[in-house]
Image (spheres, helix red, strand yellow):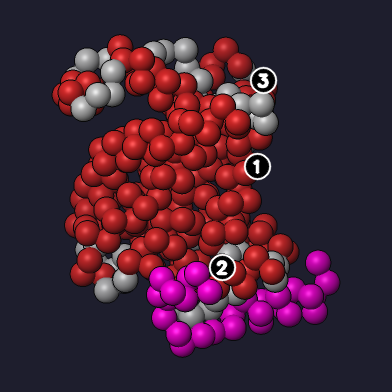
Amino acid sequence: MPRHTKEYLEESRMEKSERRFTVKGMIQDEFYNLIHMERRKFFYTAWDLSVRPAKAIGMLLNGHRKYLYPYLSYLILIGTITIFLSVRYNFFVTGYDLSDVDNFLTRFLESQGFDKAFRREFFYYAEEFATIVNLVAIPVFTLSSYLLFYRAKHNLAEHFILNVYIGAQQLLFLWITIPFLEIMPQFKDTIIAIYTGLTIVYNIWVYITFFKGNIWLNLIKAMVAITLAFIVQTPANYFTFYLLQPFLKWLDPIF
């Protein structure tokens, strides 16, 4: 890249605003991004969120609005591409039917009218539309991090933006598994299990480096926040599937 172009881009990324993020402001920003999207920042954002996510997101939240690719646009772009990649690689199709699992959660769902047939349909939906499942999880992780790190003085909108970038980057990391799935398809379950573990580690790493304070206390809070989010996102995704179920038949011919 020519030096003057790189310097211009860095100057643009460092532009700072004193206006704090709010829910109303997020909606206004996203509308603007839909009609004036700067795609050249995508690769810079992907790199920064891989090697220094806490610093990059912190820059954005501290007023450098152009430092990263717009958060919702970044998520939508990566999520859409991941859906189409899932058609080819079926990332999360394992062959196991979790609807036969018997535990407290399944017994509770059974008592609420979600029988084994419904749970089996949900299981296949979660495999085929993993991107939607991850999208539903983001608000859950937002509330969880907000509750566990409320003393960090970040508002709900800022927690949401943090978790949008984390969720989008985790989907982006899924693309890295493609060469391994092509070379060693027989080890698919192991590859996806390793990917899942690494994304959890990534989530913890971002939390403990983004939020100020004692690193060991932050580690405990991060682990509790993520565990809580994983527990809550299951019923949240069941409810989402219940609402989407009538429309999924229209999506199957597309994907």
- Most frequent secondary structure within the magenta stretch: helix
* Residue identified by numbered label 3: 183
First reached walking from the N terminus: tag 3 or tag 2: 2
Label 1's element?
helix
Q: Quadrant of the C terminus?
A: top right
Image location of residue 65, percent across then percent down: 55, 76
Question: Disc number at residue 30?
Answer: 2
* Residue identified by numbered label 1: 81
Marks 1 and 2 in Cβ contact (< 8 Å): no
Callout 2 environment at 10 Å: few (<14), some (14 to 19), or many (20+)? some
Q: Is residue 34 left or right of 236 when viewed as pictured?
A: right
First reached walking from the N terminus: tag 1 or tag 3: 1
| Alpha carbon separation for disc pair 1 and 3 | 21 Å
Label 3's element?
helix
Marks 3 and 2 in Cβ contact (< 8 Å): no
Q: Is residue 205 visible?
A: no
**Magenta-span inclusion, residue 210:** no
